[in-house]
Image (tube, rainbow, N blue to C red):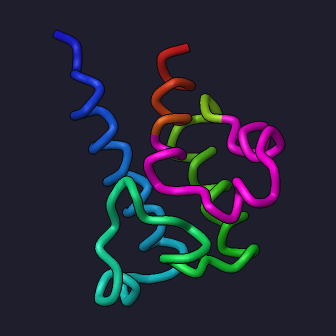
């Protein structure tokens, strides 16, 4: 039985949300509903050190199967600043399928 992409992406969004809680605490959930459209920079106002911590947690969570650093290296600075949870979830899904 395979999981449909929609369910898989929503599961990955939930995983990313849990990682964010680990990194920045759950207080941000009071102000922001995390969805696929939520951006790291504008909506969550993640600091660069927090972004690095999220990347490390992604490596741990997905046992090195997701190369977050290479993903970011392929983006322009304005794309990184506009990066959404959904875009990262899509990258994770593609990495796990590879």
Q: Nearer the viewer, residue 58 or 28?
A: 28
Which quadrant of the view contains residue 17? bottom left
Which quadrant of the view contains residue 79? bottom right
Question: From the image, which quarter does the N terminus lie in?
Answer: top left
- Residue 82: x and y in percent read 62, 61
Highlighted range, magenta: 67-89
Give the main secondary structure of the magenta stretch. helix
Question: From the image, which quarter does the C terminus lie in?
Answer: top right
Can you say whether 67 is above or below 40 in the image? above
Can you say whether 77 is above or below 95 in the image? below
- Residue 6: x and y in percent read 25, 32
Residue at coordinates 62% horizontally, 34% vertically from top-left?
A: 66
Residue 12 is inside the magenta segment: no
Residue 78 is inside the magenta segment: yes
Residue at coordinates 42% horizontally, 73% vertically from top-left?
A: 21
- Residue 67: x and y in percent read 70, 36
Q: Nearer the viewer, residue 4 or 78?
A: 78
Furthest residue toward front: 78
Can you say whether 33 is above or below 83 in the image? below
Q: Nearer the viewer, residue 12 or 85?
A: 85
């Amino acid at each position: 039985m395979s999981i449909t992409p929609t369910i898989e992406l929503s599961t990955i969004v939930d995983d990313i949300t849990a990682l964010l809680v680990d990194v920045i605490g759950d207080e941000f959930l009071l102000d922001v509903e995390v969805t696929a459209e939520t951006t790291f920079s504008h909506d969550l106002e993640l600091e660069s050190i927090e972004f690095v911590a999220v990347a490390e947690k992604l490596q741990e969570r997905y046992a090195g199967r997701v190369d977050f650093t290479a993903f970011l290296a392929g983006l322009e600075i304005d794309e990184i600043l506009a990066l959404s949870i959904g875009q990262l979830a899509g990258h994770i899904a593609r990495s796990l399928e590879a």
